[in-house]
Image (cartoon, rainbow, N blue to C red):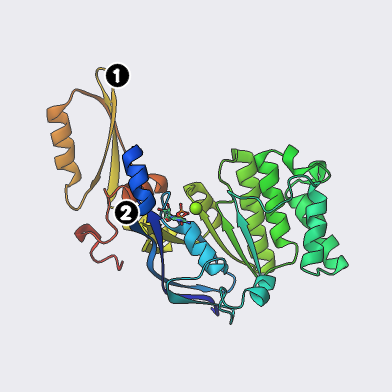
Amino acid sequence: METIIAVEGIRKYYKVAKRDRGMRAAIGQLFNRKYEVKKAVDDISFMIGRGEIVGFIGPNGAGKSTTIKMLSGILYPDAGSVEIDGFVPYKQRKQYVKNIGVVFGQKSQLNWDLPLIESFELMKFIYKIPQEQYEENLKLFSELLDMEPFLRQPVRQLSLGQRMRGDIVAALLHSPELVFLDEPTIGLDVVAKEKIREFIRYMNKTRKTTIIFTTHDMQDIEKVCDRLIIIDKGKKIYDGSIDEIKNKYTNFKTIEILLENGGKETETFDIRVTPMNSVLQKLFAEKHIKDISICEPEIDGIIRDIYEGRLLLDSPAMEGTGV
Ligand SMILES: Nc1ncnc2c1ncn2[C@@H]1O[C@H](COP(=O)(O)OP(=O)(O)O)[C@@H](O)[C@H]1O
Ligand SMILES: [Mg+2]
């Protein structure tokens, strides 16, 4: 596969003013500000092939948005390099943006006072989109995203889900080859999320658009991408397929216990470390059990356990799995 994105050792450190509480501290800080360094992105590298669809996940504050900002040329990395389709985004921003589409779910690019369709017209003008291409894309996208009913409404009257669909279309009207979507499903209901997922998949399948998106919704990833990059505290902690991560944890089982007193408990363990029979013996000896069921952990649970440090991707139990 031809490489479209090459990211090598990028870092972004923010200097943030330290704040102490209280009047005296406030006055003191006027003259003698103390700073802390926040390592938002701390030495991340990866390659992405043309036509791939990659999900970036990580807990809040992991560094996802900062990474996307460096890839889309909004921020300059403090160290490392980014090369995308022959461009260095933060150096050749003007030419580069013609090739990309960017959506920040938390911050709309649409004009609040204008009807949605007029924001689209504005995009046509800015990107010099040929009339034919514009019409074709607009028709297709509004069908796929069910936008016809609210195209002529001012953006401020739209629901979050409608607005988000508008933002996505605005970013794609010029048919970019590469699209960055930063939390495009945040705060949306299940139906709106599903529409957006289908749309993302469609664009990737039919137009071979390369798509990078961030989310903290595991369903987004499971339903949309083959590849997953997990980042936490500014570091990349996993890069591989969803199937791989599931396979890694096939030795993990979750036991759901229904107690005589009606209580419920769940426990997850690694059968190579604690064999099933010893787990069961221990449980039956210690608790009054009414019913028990054994299941494979869900991908959401696995990811949550990784974030919270209960499962390590490179723990000894993972040996031989090729992490
Ligand atoms: N402009 C900024 N100034 C200072 N700190 C920032 C700034 N932007 C982000 N951060 C901090 O950097 C870290 C990573 O932020 P971000 O990339 O937005 O994470 P994510 O998108 O994964 O939630 C967070 O701790 C955040 O508070
Ligand atoms: Mg973010």
Q: Mark 2: which amino acid?
A: Tyr
Quadrant location of ligand 1?
Answer: bottom left
Label 2, label 1: how far apart the Cα atoms are: 30 Å
Residue toward you, 255 or 96: 96
Q: Residue furthest bottom?
A: 86
Left or right of residue 238, residue 3 in this image = right
Q: Dot 2, how many residues are within 10 Å of its Cα: few (below 14), some (14-19), or many (20+)?
A: many
Q: Which mark is residue 316?
A: none
Assess whether mark 1 and mark 2 are in contact (beta carbons under 8 angstroms).
no
Above or below, 322 relative to 64: below
Q: Quadrant of residue 98?
A: bottom right
x and y percentages locating residue 246 in the rendered image: 38, 55
Farthest residue, direction right: 131
Residue 45: in sight, yes or no?
yes
User: Can you say whether 86 is above or below 150 in the image?
Assistant: below
Specify which label sits upstream in the sequence, 2 or 1. Answer: 2
Residue 264's image quarter? top left
Left or right, 134 with reference to 82: right
Q: Dot 1: what SS?
A: loop
Residue 249: give its label: 2
**Residue 282 in the image, given as x and y percentages of width and height:** 13, 35
Frontmost residue, 295 versus 154: 154
Quarter holding the C terminus is: bottom left
Report if residue 56 is visible in the image: no
Residue at image location 29% in from the left, 65% down from the top = 321
Q: How many marks?
A: 2
Residue to which mark 1 is pinned: 262
Classed neighbour count for the residue bearing mark 1: other residues with Cα under 10 Å, few (<14), some (14–19), many (≥20): few
Badge 2 marks a residue whose secondary structure is loop
Please provide percent x and percent y for residue 116. 78, 48
- Give the residue type that dot 1 points to: Gly
